[in-house]
Every structure is written in C-alpha cells, then in structure tokens.
Amino acid sequence: MTAYKTFSETDVIQYVQELGYFKKSQDLHCVEMGDGNLNLVFRVSDAKNNSLIVKQALPYARCVGESWPLTLDRARIEAEVLLEHFKISPEYTVNIIHYDAALATIVMQDLNAFEIMRGELVAGKRFPHVGRQLGRHLAQTLFYTSDFYLSAKEKKRQVARFINPDLCQITEDLFFTDPYRENERNNIFQPTETLSLELRTDDNLLAEVAELKAKFLNNTQALLHGDMHSGSLFVDDKTMKVIDAEFGFYGPMGFDVGSPIGNYLLNYCGSAAKWDGKQKANHLSILKDITRDTWTVFAKEMTELMDDKTQDLALQSPTYQARFLRSVFLDTIGYAGCELIRRTVGLAHVSDLESIQETNARAVAEANAIALGKALINKRHSFVSIEDVLLEAEAIVGA
Ligand code: ADP
Ligand code: MG
C-alpha cells in the first residue's frame, strides 16, 4: 500500500498515468485549482483537452493550516456518499472514477463545462431549472437511503459506514454553536456587531437552535450530502451536478433540503441590497421560483415515493407519511434559517453578501439575512407551506 503524501502537480501526472487514465507517452498538464476551504483539487489534461479532476484531502483544514488537524477519512466519505447518490441519481451527481484510501485521493469527472452556482447567482445569472432538478435529486437520494426503503439491518449498516464525527463536529460548531456566542472563529462585519450580540441573548431563538442541533446530532433519517450549498452545485443552462460530499452522514433530511434554500435566500438578501429596478425584481423573482420548486418538487416526489415504494409495513401508514413530510418541512425551514445566520456572523462567509462593495448596502443585506434567519427559525411552526417562507422574505427584504 502506498503511504500518504501530499501531492504536487508532478505527482498527480504520474498518478493518473500509473492508473492508466492517460498513456505514459502523453504530454500532460496539471494545475491545482482548489478554491475550497479544505482540500487540494487538481485538473490534469492532455493536449486534446481530455481532462480529469484529482481531489486530495490534506491531514488538516487547508483554510486554517496544520493547527486544525482533520481526518483523511473524509475522502472516503466523500467518494462513498457520491457513489451511493450516483447509483440513485446519476444525472445530477458527479461521476467518481476512482478512490484511493491510503493517498486520500478521488479521481472524478471534470465538470469544466459547468459553473459553480454561487458565483453565477452573484453575477445575476438565471437557472430556472435548478429548483426542480434539485428537488428531484433530494427526494431520490434521501428516500432510497432511508428506513422507508432499506431494511432496518441494511440501514444500520449504512449508518455505521457513514459515521463522520470530525466533519459533523465542524457543522455542529459552526452552524449551531459559534454564531450564538462569543468565539474567536466568528467573523463579524463591524456594522453587524449589534445584531450579532442580540442573537446571544434571545432565549427563544437559542432554544429553537438547540432543538435543530439535537436533531442534527440524533436523527439518522437518510444519507445526507451534508454540505448542499450553492458552492457544491455545478450548473449550466440545462442541468446541474452535485459535488463535494465530504460532510455526508446519516442525518435529518431537512438539513440537505434546507441548506440550498438558505443559500438562495442569502443571495436574495444580497441581490436586494445591491440592485434595484427591473434587475432586482427579475432576480428576486427567479430566486423565489427556485426556492418554491426545490421544496414543492421534493415534497411531491417524496410523497409519491413513500406511497409507492415504502417497504416497511408500519411506515406505509399514509397518516404517518404526511406527518413525516410536515416534520421535514419544519426542519428544512429551521436549517435554512440557521444557514442564513451562520453565513453572516460565523466563520464561513459567502460571496453573496461579502462581495457587496458598498458598506451600507452590505450592512442592509446582513441585517436582512439575520432577521430572515431568525424569523424562519422562530416562526416555522406557524408556516403552512413554502409560500409562507417567500412571504416572510418579501416582508423583511422586499420583492
Ligand atoms: P473543498 O472540499 O476543498 O471545498 P470542492 O470540492 O468544493 O473543494 O472543490 C473546490 C473547487 O474545485 C470547486 O469550487 C471547483 O472550482 C473545483 N472543482 C471541484 N470538483 C470539480 C470537478 N469535478 N470538476 C471541475 N472543477 C471542480
Ligand atoms: Mg468541501
């Protein structure tokens, strides 16, 4: 077995040649292009532009350095979650070609014909198909990995296989704990300081966030992607592909549905503050459509799958299934709210807000993201449908 070492560009070229993906005689070009927080991402290509991506986990978090050690097992989790999801939803999942445990490397399809959705949304581009496709992908991947479909024993084997304590702890801290208290990891824009301090003394909010965290810690409903933000979605004008599942584990379905919705709404807050007139109205309207479609298509497909394909006799109860969907809705809205808050005052920010140059506009966007996040978390039990979320966004941010 090869011992782990951090790859250079030359190592990557040799590696893909040894694996037989390119001939040894071929002249290959390799660049490291990771813009993410944690890993190395290389693109290796030949003179005819045939290319592959090689992603390697480092024994620490790239954005912080060796003082933040991090398990290499995350490469296994990423590869195996994506392979499981690919079996269920191949159209919308990046194709993993090879995984190497010792080197913590993944070889995958190069999605160079696509763009990362976050940057495209920040630039005001439109992807009206993404909500429907993501809703479908989420329903399929979550249903077929859940107790509705798998036998209880198989499901437990899968839960054990995808135990991911190190990466889950990052989410547990950054999502649910740090933004609500003093912590040196928080990153607070000065004009947002007062609002961020208020979060720490809002007892009702703290109780609701505790409930969402407890569910994240305890509820092994389905094999989640675990980091389904708009930076993990590659899009073009027809379709989309999901990448980067190293935070995958068995958790509450609403976490995977709520994360992208929280990210559309972060873009909503940013776009409303930096644009006006028709440009603003059109973009906000598209974001509302994507949000609505993500939930409604997810809910419709999930309802049909539960109705047609549930194997467990007890879980075939239609009343139970309706209650289950309602609880996933409440979790979705709650986790979307947490995403709005943690991306504003926590460690990991998003360009949807941070790229706003004008201080006042950014301050307004951040204040709205916090207010909307709080409203979604606190008021979710009174929401009947996804329309209530959109009405809340319009009331707080504008339309
Ligand atoms: P990290 O886990 O470190 O956050 P990501 O998986 O998000 O890394 O990848 C970082 C960047 O590398 C992406 O934003 C994208 O630009 C590029 N990238 C990752 N996977 C692919 C791929 N399959 N095809 C093309 N580019 C990719
Ligand atoms: Mg990642």
Image: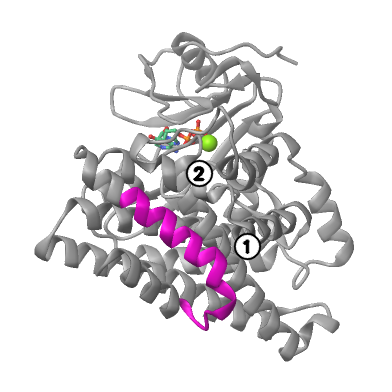
| Label 2 secondary element | helix
Question: Residue tagged by mark 1?
Answer: 204
Confirm whether the magenta stretch covers residue 283. Answer: no
Q: Residue at x 84, y 67 (%)?
A: 151
Residue 359 picture quarter: top left
Label 1 near ligand 2 (CB < 8 Å): no
Question: Residue tagged by mark 2?
Answer: 197
The crowding category of the residue bearing disc 1, from other C-alpha atoms within 10 Å (few below 14, some 14 to 19, many at least 20), is few
Q: Residue at x 37, y 19 (%)?
A: 31
Q: Residue at x 72, y 59 (%)?
A: 215
Tell me the distance, in whole angstroms, between the alpha carbons under discs 1 and 2.
15 Å
Q: Nearer the viewer, residue 350 or 139?
A: 350
Q: Quadrant of the C terminus?
A: bottom left
Numbered range of the magenta stretch: 365-386
Give the image location of residue 178, x and y in percent: 60, 39
Q: Nearer the viewer, residue 313 or 292?
A: 292
Q: Is residue 311 left or right of residue 397?
A: right
